[in-house]
């Protein structure tokens, strides 16, 4: 009798174990997170991006060869350090379990067709390969996203500040900087770099043709041109009294650019011969460039001799 009871208890335990296993397998199946890419796009093949906000501001970037240009900012070059990482993030967005699948919730998450923080479209030619709305943020470096035509809303690793709607925020602000400078010609001097050292000569024949350069002053001028950044873009010089113009020719190998640095009232600008636009620049950089002349660039003993 005791053996029979033990057998029944064993069968009961066995059934409970089997039932629990089936229950947990079912629960696990119900909570399996769907994996896969949120967008079916290849970053390398995208050639146009359109970003807009709910207030009607919009920016369009178009790829030309390997460079990106800003269509609504004189086709000036965009910053690849902003465009390429964004495309990579979009390509690698993962589709986790949706936050909601109801159309009624779209306005609350600010991802509806009418209420949104950003609307992003990516194109390959005329075909849209991504069309998404970005809305509220559920946490640090994440945002709610909805694909156009789909009711599901997802939380993904992205930021709305990765998608500015002001064209200047996409601009390559170093577009006027000069790398690997080999010579600089100013109003009364010419600097030539030879074997990592600067040689100075006067443009005015009344001066000695060659003189020792002040290496620190020459390096500071070269650094100012290498680190030149623009702070705004203008079609024309703003109305103000023009104070000074400083011409500068800068060469790197066989490439040379002609610059014009302008002080107009308390504003400072620069233009370059290959671009029609005028660019605002920082007063500190203008001061470094404007102070460079034959005397300032000469070594101490040369200045004493003069």
Image: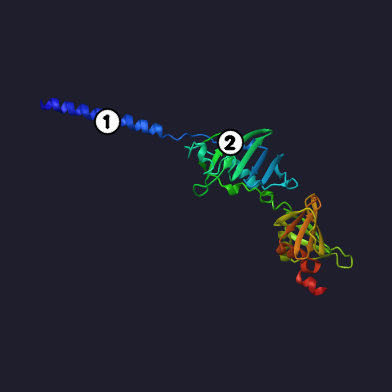
Q: Is residue 239 above or below residue 158?
A: below
Where residue 250 appears, x then y in whole percent? Answer: 79, 55
State the scheme by which the image is colored: rainbow
Q: Is residue 277 above or below residue 221?
A: above
Q: Secondary structure at mark 2?
A: loop
Where residue 278 appears, x then y in whole percent? Answer: 78, 55
Q: Nearer the viewer, residue 280 or 111?
A: 111
Q: Nearer the viewer, residue 144 or 229?
A: 144
Where residue 191 appears, x then y in whole percent? Answer: 79, 60
Identify residue for label 2: 148
User: From this viewpoint, which residue is outermost toward the front?
Assistant: 104
Q: Which corner quadrant of the image does residue 222 belong to?
A: bottom right
Q: Secondary structure at mark 1?
A: helix
The C terminus: image quadrant? bottom right
Q: How many marks?
A: 2
Identify residue for label 1: 17
Q: Nearer the viewer, residue 288 or 9?
A: 9
Please rate how many residues cluster around mark 1, counting C-alpha atoms within 10 Å: few if below 14, some from 14 to 19, many from 20.
few
Name the side, left or right, on which 6 lies relative to 59: left
The N terminus: image quadrant? top left
Tell me how far mark 1 sits from mark 2, CA to CA: 46 Å
- Does residue 150 appear in this view? yes
Which mark sits nearer the N-terminus, 1 or 2? 1
């Amino acid at each position: 009798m005791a053996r029979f009871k033990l057998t029944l208890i064993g069968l009961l335990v066995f059934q409970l174990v089997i039932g629990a296993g089936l229950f947990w397998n079912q629960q696990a199946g119900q909570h399996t997170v769907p994996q896969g890419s949120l967008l079916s796009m290849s970053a390398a093949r995208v050639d146009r991006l359109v970003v807009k906000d709910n207030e009607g501001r919009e920016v369009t970037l178009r790829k030309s060869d390997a460079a990106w240009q800003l269509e609504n900012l004189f086709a000036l070059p965009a910053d690849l350090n902003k465009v390429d990482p964004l495309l990579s993030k979009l390509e690698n967005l993962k589709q986790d379990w949706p936050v909601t699948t109801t159309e009624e919730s779209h306005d609350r998450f600010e991802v509806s067709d009418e209420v949104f923080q950003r609307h992003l479209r990516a194109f390959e030619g005329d075909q849209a390969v991504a069309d998404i709305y970005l809305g509220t943020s559920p946490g640090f470096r994440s945002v709610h996203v909805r694909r156009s035509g789909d009711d599901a809303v997802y939380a993904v690793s992205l930021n709305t500040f990765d998608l500015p709607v002001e064209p200047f925020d996409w601009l390559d602000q170093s577009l006027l900087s000069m790398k690997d400078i080999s010579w600089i010609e100013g109003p009364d001097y010419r600097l030539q770099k030879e074997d990592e050292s600067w040689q100075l000569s006067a443009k005015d024949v009344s001066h000695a043709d060659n003189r020792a350069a002040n290496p620190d002053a020459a390096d500071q001028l070269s650094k100012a041109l290498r680190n030149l950044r623009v702070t705004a873009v203008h079609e024309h010089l703003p109305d103000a009294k023009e104070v000074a113009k400083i011409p500068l020719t800068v060469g790197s190998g066989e490439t040379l650019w002609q610059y014009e640095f302008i002080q107009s009232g308390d504003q400072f600008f620069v233009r370059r011969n290959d671009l029609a636009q005028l660019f605002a620049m920082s007063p500190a950089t203008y001061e470094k460039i404007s102070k460079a002349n034959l005397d300032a660039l000469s070594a101490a003993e040369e200045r004493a001799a003069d």
